[in-house]
Amino acid sequence: MSDIYIYYLTGVLLSIAWLALTPQSLVLPTGRELACLAYAGILCNCVGVIVWFKALKVANATLVGNIAYSAAFLNVLVMHFLVGSPIRIPSLIGLCLIATGVLLASRYATAKNRPPSARLSEPDPS
């Protein structure tokens, strides 16, 4: 069984246990909340995992890995426009740090994949 299935199975089991122990905590979601749950469940998880594995088959893992971090930008925008959640300074700082990391990782991966003749290096002493 792959790690992703163990991850989701653990979440389902813990959710069932929580609801069994605290049935009064169950509140039915509103229409807007259902829309957000559908977005998160279908688009982010289902479609995202499928696209992720297909991308890993055809591209460099370092570059594909950076795509995962771009999801934070999409999530902030969706939560802002769909739910009305404000975009605060800590979120902006976090997004800037993520963007910096993605750019550095992409640059490193691109430089690492260049042929040796195209890389910047010290001159050959011979």
Image (cartoon, rainbow, N blue to C red):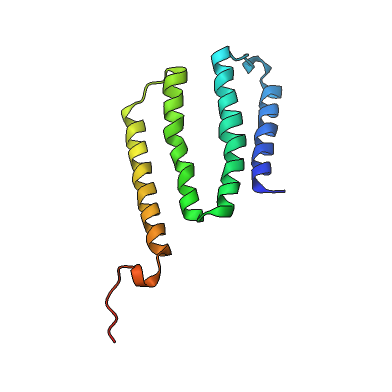
| Observer-nearest of 32 and 106 | 106
- Residue at position x 60%, y 29% from top? 41
Image location (x, y in percent) of residue 20 = 71, 23
Compared with 117, 11 (above or below) is above
Q: Quadrant of residue 52?
A: top right
How many dots with numbers? Answer: 0
Compared with 20, 59 (above or below) is below
Image position of 35 (left or right of 117): right
Q: Quadrant of residue 107?
A: bottom left
| Observer-nearest of 16 and 48 | 48
Image location (x, y in percent) of residue 5 = 68, 42
Quadrant location, the C terminus: bottom left
Image location (x, y in percent) of residue 12 = 68, 32
Image position of 122 (left or right of 47): left
Compared with 96, 81 (above or below) is above
Q: Quadrant of residue 51?
A: top right
Image location (x, y in percent) of residue 32 = 54, 15
Question: Which residue reaches farthest bottom?
Answer: 126
- Residue at position x 55%, y 17% from top? 33
- Residue at position x 70%, y 33% from top? 13
- Residue at position x 57%, y 19% from top? 35
Image position of 55 (left or right of 95): right
